[in-house]
Image (cartoon, rainbow, N blue to C red):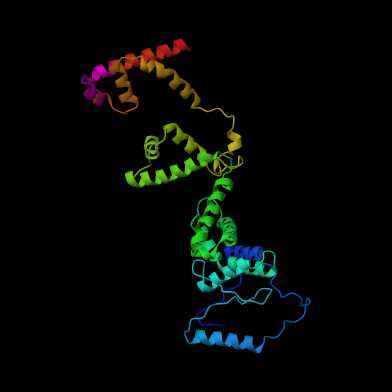
Amino acid sequence: MNEGHEAPAPGQQSRGDAVRRGLLAAVEHEREPRGRAEGAPEAAPSAGATDGRAEQMDGHEHGRHTSRRDPSPGPTGRAYPTPSGRGYPADRGAAREMFHELRKLPEGTAEYAELRNALVRMHLPLVEHLARRFRNRGEPLDDLTQVATIGLIKSVDRFDPDRGVEFSTYATPTVVGEIKRHFRDKGWAVRVPRRLQELRLSLTSATAELSQRHGRAPTVHELAEQLGISEEEVLEGLESANAYSTLSLDVPDTDDESPAVADTLGAEDDALEGVEYRESLKPLLEELPPREKKILLLRFFGNMTQSQIAQEVGISQMHVSRLLARTLAQLRERLLVEE
C-alpha cells in the first residue's frame, strides 16, 4: 500500500460513488476474460507482468512520472490510462491515440466496444465536474450526473481527433447542453411552453442582477425594462415558475398543526367581501373632486394623519376632518344604493 493513501472505512462510500459504479457498469461490457470456466482459478501473472508492476512501483518510489493504469484490464487483457483531475486522462497523448485507434476499428466488434468504454471511463470526472455546476437547482445531483454521462457518450461517438481540438473542449458544450435539456424537458412538474421556460430563466438572471444593483427585489416595471418586454409578459413568466414544482394537497398549509391544503379548498374567504367593496369603490373614487380624492388617498393609502394632510393640502386640520367625514358618507350612501 502506498504511503499517504488510507483505504476508506466500510460504509463511508457516498451515494455518488455508487452512481459512478453504476454508470461504469452501464457503458462497459463484461470485463472477465472470455473462455475461462466459471470457478476456475485465475492464471498466475507472467514474469514480464510481475516485472512491469515492480518497475512501476519502483518509479513511484524514486519520484519518476509514470502513467497510471487501470488495475482491471478489459476482455482483451489491455490496460488503459485512468482519469486524472477534472476529467483529463493522466496521459492526454495516450487518449488522443486511443481516439485515433477507435476511428479505425469497425463498430460492433469487441475491440471497438472495449476501447469506447475505456474512453468514457477516462472522462467520467469531467461529467461529475460539469454536473456539480448545476446542483441545488431542484434536481438531484445523481440524476444530473447520469444525464451528463449521456452527453459524454455522444461526444465520444462523434469526436474527430484529426481536428486538433482537445476532447474536453469538444465534449463540454454537448454535456452541458444535455443537462440543460433535462431541466427544460424533465424538470417541470407541469408542462409549459418552451417560451415561458426560457422567459423564466431570463427573469431569474435579471432578478439577481437588479437585486444586486439596487439592494432590493426589483419591481415588475424594472424587470420589464431590463428585458425589453411588457409588464404582462413579466407577470406571465413569474406565474409560470409555479409549474416547476408541485405540492401535495395532503401537506399542511403552513405548519404541522394547520389543516391540509385540501381541507381549505372551497372554504369561505373572509377577505372576499373586501374585494367586492374595493372593486365597487374604484369608479366612485374616480368621480370625486381632485381635492377630496387626494385627501382620501393620503389618509388611507399614505397613512398620513389629518394634521399632515392639512399641511400637504394647505387647509386646516378641522377642514380636513369635515371633508373626510362628508366624502366617506357620500361613498357609503352610494354603495348602499347600488346594493
Give the quadrant of residue 231: top left
Q: How many marks?
A: 0
Q: Is residue 12 visible?
A: no
Residue 93: give x, y in percent of width and height.
Answer: 51, 73
Q: Residue furthest top?
A: 337
Foreground of the two, 1 or 73 = 73
Foreground of the two, 245 or 19 = 19
Image position of 313 (left or right of 265) = left
Foreground of the two, 291 or 132 = 132
Can residue 311 be found in the magenta stretch? yes
- The magenta span reads 308-322
Give me the residue at 54% from left, 57% from top: 175
Residue 291: give x, y in percent of width and height.
Answer: 28, 17
Q: Main secondary structure of the magenta part?
A: helix
Q: As displayed, is residue 190 above or below residue 316?
A: below
Residue 207: give x, y in percent of width and height.
Answer: 40, 43
Give me the residue at 68% from left, 75% from top: 76
Q: Is residue 316 visible?
A: yes
Can residue 173 be found in the magenta stretch? no
Image position of 117 (left or right of 91) = right
Image position of 296 (left or right of 141) = left
